[in-house]
Image (cartoon, rainbow, N blue to C red):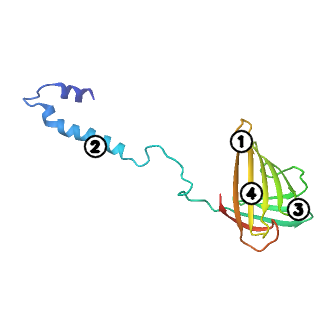
Amino acid sequence: MGALLLYLHCPTIMGRNPLRLHGPWLAALFTGTNLLAATDPFVGTWIYNNQKSPKPTIRYAIKDLGGERYSLTGSTGVTVEVKADGVPIKTASGDIVSFKKLDEHDWEMVRDDGQKMVRTYNISEDDKTLTLHDVFKGESGNNYETTARYARLTPGKSIFGEWQSFSL
């Protein structure tokens, strides 16, 4: 770099002015790199557009195992077996989970995996739509809510059957 600066600083080398010979080339080089940096499509401020962004499809399955015991299989494919008595149990992954039936159309799950979540399951009157309303409470005050709606994929009654998301 020092040799380049000395070369450019010298008014003449062997009777030639280096800026006259190489100045246009250097100007094009520096201008071109700036233009390339400015046209990078990922540079800038991004705003999430819910209307244009793709939505993931999530499947959920709930099976009645008898004796007030149920299996819940989420989008990750992990199945948790619970008893609908509201008593917390420890799952294989170490989460604390409880599940209970509130009435014919509403169920509640409480999960604690370091962040407490209360999930309300609501089944529509026609048994075709499942709505999951999640309330998250974090230790650092990071609280938020989400709602997801699912359509029934397989025949079933109440909460039981396979479901696929259509609104997240």
Considering only order in the chain, which callout, 2 or 3, is on the residue closer to the N terminus?
2
Q: Which residue is mark 1?
A: 143
Considering only order in the chain, which callout, 1 or 2, is on the residue closer to the N terminus?
2
The disc label shown at residue 32, or none: 2
Please tell me which residue lies in front, 1 or 103: 103
Please tell me which residue lies in front, 17 or 3: 17
Q: Nearer the viewer, mark 4 or mark 2?
A: 4
Q: Residues within 10 Å of mark 2 (few under 14, many from 20)?
A: few
Above or below for 123 versus 23: below
Q: Residues within 10 Å of mark 3 (few under 14, many from 20)?
A: some
Q: Which residue is mark 4?
A: 132
Residue 112 screen position, x and y as percent: 79, 46
In whole angstroms, how far apart are the C-alphas of marks 4 and 2? Answer: 53 Å
Q: Amino acid at mark 3?
A: Arg
Above or below for 78 versus 138: below
Q: Secondary structure at mark 3?
A: strand
